[in-house]
C-alpha cells in the first residue's frame, strides 16, 4: 500500500493505492495537515509515502511532521530529464514543477498520443506532450480564482466577483467571471494548435477548474480526476492504477 500526496499551493490532495487500485482519495487544506496522521494510521500497511510538493519546504516538513510515526518518511518526486518514458525538454529539467512532471507522466500512461496536459488549480498549467512522449514546453497562468482576486485587489471599482459565464456579459460580475474563464479556455485552445494536426491528439483536463473549462472548449478533451496523483502512481509502481 502506498500513500501518494500532491501538495499544491492551496490544497494537499492524497490517494492510497494497493495492487494497482485506488482505495481512497481526498484533499486537505494546509491548516488541516494534522489529519494526515489519522489517515495513515487508518490504513495499516503503508510501505511508502511518495509525493509531489510545489508548496515549499515548510509544507514538506509539515507533512513529514504530521505523519510522524504513522507511515514511512515521505519521498518527493523531482523533475528530471527522463522518467517512465517521458522526456523533459525544459531548459533546466529540475526547474519544472513536480506536479506538472507527474501529470505529464500520468498523461503518457493514459494516452500514448500527442496531448495537451491541462491542470487548472491555483495556477493553471498547459503543457505540450508530443506523440513520442517528449514534453516540448508549456505555459503557466493564474488560475481563474487568482485572476478574479487580482482584479479585486488592484482596482478601485471591481469587486471579488462570483458571476456567471456569458458570451456577452451585461453586468460587472458576469464580465469578470467570463473574462477570466475565457482567458483560461483561450490559453488552452491556443496551445492546442501546436498538436491539433497530430493523430488522436486531445487535451487532458484535471484540477478544480476542469469542469468549468470543459464547458467552453471547442477542442477535443477528456476529463481526468487527480492526474498528478495518477502520475505519481505510475512513478511509484510502474503502472497506472485504476
Ligand atoms: N466552480 C468553479 N468554476 C470555475 N473554476 C473553478 C471552480 N471551482 C474551482 N475552480 C478553479 O479551480 C481552482 C482550484 O482547483 P484545485 O482544487 O485543483 O486546486 P487546488 O488544489 O486548490 O490547487 P493547488 O493544486 O494549486 O493547491 C481554483 O483556483 C479555480 O480557479
Ligand atoms: C506552476 C505551479 C505553481 C503549478 O502548480 C508549479 O508547477 C510550480 O511551482 N512550478 C515551478 C516552475 C515551473 O514549473 O516552471
Ligand atoms: K496548481
Image: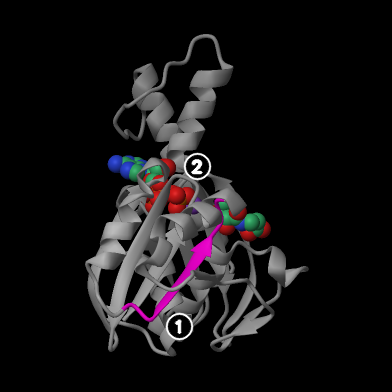
Q: Is residue 48 magenta?
A: yes
Quadrant where the N terminus lies? bottom left
Front in this rendered view, residue 61 or 110? 61
Left or right: 7, with 70 as reference point: right
Q: Residue at x 50, y 71 (%)?
A: 102
- Compared to 232, does 99 lie above or below? above
Q: Residue at x 52, y 51 (%)?
A: 59
Could you tell me if residue 190 is visible in this image?
no
- Compared to 237, does 88 lie above or below? above
Q: Is residue 40 magenta?
A: no
Q: Position of residue 99 (x, y in %)?
A: 52, 63
Q: Earlier in the sequence, mark 2 or mark 1?
A: 2
Q: Residue at x 22, y 67 (%)?
A: 42
Q: Secondary structure at mark 2?
A: helix
Left or right: 40, with 232 as reference point: left
Q: Which mark is residue 183?
A: 2
Q: Which residues are magenta?
A: 46-55
How is the model colour-coded?
Answer: one colour
Could you tell me if residue 12 is visible in this image?
yes
- Compared to 137, does 22 lie above or below? below
Q: Position of residue 98 (x, y in %)?
A: 57, 66
Of circles 2 and 1, which is in front? 1
Q: Residue at x 33, y 77 (%)?
A: 46
Front in this rendered view, residue 185 or 87? 87
Does the beta carbon at disc 1 come under 8 Å from ligand 1? no
Quadrant where the C terminus lies? bottom left
Q: Which residue is mark 1?
A: 236
Label 2 Cα crowd, 10 Å radius (few <14 / some 14-19 / many 20+)? some
Label 1 Cα crowd, 10 Å radius (few <14 / some 14-19 / many 20+)? some
Q: Position of residue 122 (x, y in %)?
A: 47, 45
What residue occupies the far right of the structure in this picture?
Answer: 91
Q: Secondary structure at mark 1?
A: helix
Amino acid at each position: 500500500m502506498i500513500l501518494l500526496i500532491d501538495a499544491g499551493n492551496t490544497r494537499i490532495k492524497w490517494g492510497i493505492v494497493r495492487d494497482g487500485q485506488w482505495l481512497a482519495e481526498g484533499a486537505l487544506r494546509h491548516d488541516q495537515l494534522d489529519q494526515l496522521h489519522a489517515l495513515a494510521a487508518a490504513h495499516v500497511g503503508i510501505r511508502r509515502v511518495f509525493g509531489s510538493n510545489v508548496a515549499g519546504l515548510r509544507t514538506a516538513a509539515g507533512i513529514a511532521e504530521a505523519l510522524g510515526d504513522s507511515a514511512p518518511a515521505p519521498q518527493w518526486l523531482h523533475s528530471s530529464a527522463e522518467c517512465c518514458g517521458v522526456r523533459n525538454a525544459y531548459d533546466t529539467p529540475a526547474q519544472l514543477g513536480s506536479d506538472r512532471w507527474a501529470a505529464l507522466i500520468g498523461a503518457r500512461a493514459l494516452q500514448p498520443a500527442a496531448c495537451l496536459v491541462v491542470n487548472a488549480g491555483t495556477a493553471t498549467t498547459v503543457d505540450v506532450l508530443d506523440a513520442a512522449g517528449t514534453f516540448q514546453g508549456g505555459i503557466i497562468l493564474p488560475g481563474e480564482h487568482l485572476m478574479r482576486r487580482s482584479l479585486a485587489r488592484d482596482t478601485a471599482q471591481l469587486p471579488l466577483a462570483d458571476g456567471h459565464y456569458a458570451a456577452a456579459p451585461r453586468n460587472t460580475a458576469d464580465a469578470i467571471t467570463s473574462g477570466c474563464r475565457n482567458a483560461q479556455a483561450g490559453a488552452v485552445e491556443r496551445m492546442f494548435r501546436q498538436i491539433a494536426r497530430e493523430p488522436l491528439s486531445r487535451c487532458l483536463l484535471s484540477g478544480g477548474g476542469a469542469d468549468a473549462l470543459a464547458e467552453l472548449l471547442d477542442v477535443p478533451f477528456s476529463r481526468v480526476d487527480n492526474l498528478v496523483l495518477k502520475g505519481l502512481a505510475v512513478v511509484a509502481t510502474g503502472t497506472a492504477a485504476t
